[in-house]
C-alpha cells in the first residue's frame, strides 16, 4: 500500500501515453498548438508496461489512460491488452476526446474497459468547433452515442469557460437525464500553455452549482467515492447525475489518492507541481522494478499538502496536454 506523508492512501495512477492531440482546445493550448514530444522522447510501450506493473505491485488499484489524446498513439490497444492481464489491477479507465475511439469500442468492451470519460465542452456544434478549433462534433457525438448504447459507463467532462460555453450547462444536465449518464463540470485551470491567463475564476464551483439550482432546485448530494475530485448530485425525479470538479478551487486535496506519470516518464505527485522523478532514462539504463521502487516511495513521502502549497513553490505553466489531464 502506498501512503504519503499526509497519511493519504495512493491507489490511482493517471498514465499519459502521449502528449500529442488532434484538437487544439482553447483551455488547453494556443491556436498554433504546442511543441509536442518527439516519439523518441516518449517511454516505449515496454517501459510504460514495466512502470505501470511496478506501481500496481506497490499498491495502485486503478489506472486511467490519458493523453494528449491516447488514441493518436499507435499500439495503444496492444498495451491495454497487456495491462488488463496484470494481477492486482482492479480498473482501467480512459479519458479521451472520442474522435478516434469508434473503431475500438468493441475491443475495449471485450477487455472489460468500460469506464470512459469524454472531454466534450458543448452540445452546440458551432460552439464545440470554436472551442476545439476543429470540426469533429459529429464524430464525437456519434461515438458517445455508441458507447452509451453498448453499455459503457460514460462521463462527459465539460470545462466551464466564462463567456464561451456557460449556456451549455443546462443542456448537459438534460443530456444526462435523457441518456441516464453523468456529466461533470470542471472549473477552468491555468494549464493552457499561455493561451490566456487569469488570476480570478469567474465561474467557480459555487457559481456553477447556483446556476443549476436556479433551473433545478431539487438537487441531492450523492455519496462520493473515496478520493473523488467531484461533488456529485442527482435531481429529483430525473435520471442521470452531474458532478462539479473544483479543479481551480482545489477543495478535494485533503483526500487526493492519485499521482500522474507523463508520456515521457515524469512523475508528478500533484497537478500543480513540477516533475519529481524522471523514469525514462533509468528504465533505458536498467529496466528493473527494484531500481524505480525506492524513487516512487521517496516521491510519495514528499508530497505537498495541497495544490496551493504546490503552486506557491513552483512556477508551473505547462499545457494540460503535457500534464496528462
Image (spheres, rainbow, N blue to C red):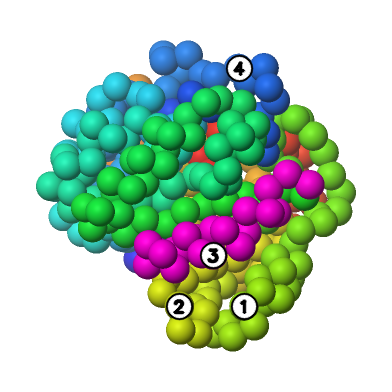
Q: Quadrant of residue 2?
A: bottom left
- For marks 3 and 4, give the CA distance: 36 Å
- For marks 4 and 1, give the CA distance: 43 Å
Q: Earlier in the sequence, mark 4 or mark 1?
A: 4
- For marks 3 and 1, give the CA distance: 9 Å
The residue to which callout 3 is attached is: 173
Q: Which mark is residue 37?
A: none
Vertical arrangement, residue 9 with respect to residue 65, above or below:
below
Label 4 crowd (10 A; few <14 / some 14-19 / many >=20): few
Q: Which mark is residue 238?
A: 2
Estimate the x, y position of residue 181 in percent, counting from the top left: 39, 64
Q: Relative to 257, is 169 on the left or the right?
A: right
Label 2 crowd (10 A; few <14 / some 14-19 / many >=20): some
Q: Earlier in the sequence, mark 2 or mark 3?
A: 3
The residue to which callout 4 is attached is: 35
**SS of the residue under disc 3:** helix
Report if the CB atoms under discs 1 and 2 are less than 8 Å apart: yes
Quadrant including the N terminus: bottom left
Per the image, is 175 magenta? yes
Q: Which of these two is toward me, 158 or 180?
A: 180
- For marks 2 and 3, give the CA distance: 10 Å
Which residue sits at x=42%, y=22%?
A: 42
Which residue sits at x=67%, y=38%?
A: 27
Label 3 crowd (10 A; few <14 / some 14-19 / many >=20): many
Report if the CB atoms under discs 4 and 1 are less than 8 Å apart: no
The residue to which callout 1 is attached is: 216
Q: Is residue 97 visible?
A: yes
Report if the CB atoms under discs 3 and 1 are less than 8 Å apart: yes
What is the magenta range? 163-185
Amino acid at each position: 500500500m502506498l501512503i504519503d506523508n499526509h497519511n493519504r492512501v495512493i491507489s490511482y495512477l493517471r498514465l499519459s501515453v502521449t502528449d500529442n492531440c488532434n484538437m487544439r482546445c482553447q483551455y488547453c493550448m494556443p491556436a498554433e498548438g504546442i511543441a509536442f514530444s518527439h516519439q523518441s522522447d516518449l517511454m516505449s510501450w515496454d517501459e510504460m508496461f514495466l512502470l505501470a506493473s511496478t506501481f500496481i505491485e506497490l499498491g495502485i488499484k486503478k489506472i486511467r489512460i490519458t493523453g494528449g489524446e491516447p488514441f493518436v498513439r499507435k499500439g495503444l490497444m496492444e498495451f491495454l491488452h497487456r495491462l488488463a492481464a496484470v494481477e492486482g489491477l482492479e480498473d482501467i479507465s480512459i479519458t479521451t476526446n472520442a474522435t478516434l475511439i469508434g473503431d475500438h469500442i468493441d475491443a475495449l468492451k471485450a477487455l472489460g474497459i468500460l469506464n470512459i470519460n469524454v472531454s466534450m465542452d458543448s452540445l452546440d456544434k458551432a460552439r464545440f468547433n470554436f472551442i476545439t478549433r476543429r470540426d469533429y462534433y459529429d464524430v464525437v457525438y456519434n461515438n458517445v452515442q455508441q458507447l452509451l448504447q453498448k453499455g459503457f459507463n460514460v462521463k462527459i467532462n465539460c470545462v466551464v469557460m466564462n463567456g464561451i460555453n456557460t449556456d451549455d450547462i443546462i443542456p448537459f444536465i438534460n443530456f444526462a437525464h435523457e441518456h441516464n449518464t453523468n456529466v461533470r463540470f470542471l472549473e477552468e485551470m491555468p494549464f493552457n500553455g499561455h493561451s490566456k491567463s487569469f488570476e480570478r475564476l469567474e465561474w467557480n464551483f459555487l457559481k456553477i452549482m447556483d446556476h443549476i439550482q436556479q433551473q433545478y432546485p431539487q438537487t441531492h448530494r450523492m455519496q462520493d467515492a473515496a478520493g473523488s475530485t467531484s461533488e456529485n448530485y442527482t435531481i429529483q425525479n430525473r435520471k442521470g447525475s452531474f458532478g462539479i470538479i473544483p479543479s481551480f478551487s482545489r477543495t478535494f486535496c485533503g483526500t487526493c489518492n492519485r499521482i500522474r506519470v507523463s508520456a515521457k516518464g515524469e512523475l508528478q505527485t500533484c497537478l500543480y507541481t513540477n516533475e519529481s522523478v524522471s523514469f525514462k532514462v533509468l528504465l533505458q539504463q536498467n529496466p528493473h522494478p527494484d531500481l524505480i521502487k525506492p524513487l516512487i516511495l521517496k516521491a510519495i513521502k514528499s508530497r505537498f499538502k495541497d495544490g496551493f502549497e504546490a503552486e506557491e513553490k513552483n512556477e508551473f505553466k505547462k499545457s494540460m496536454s503535457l500534464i496528462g489531464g
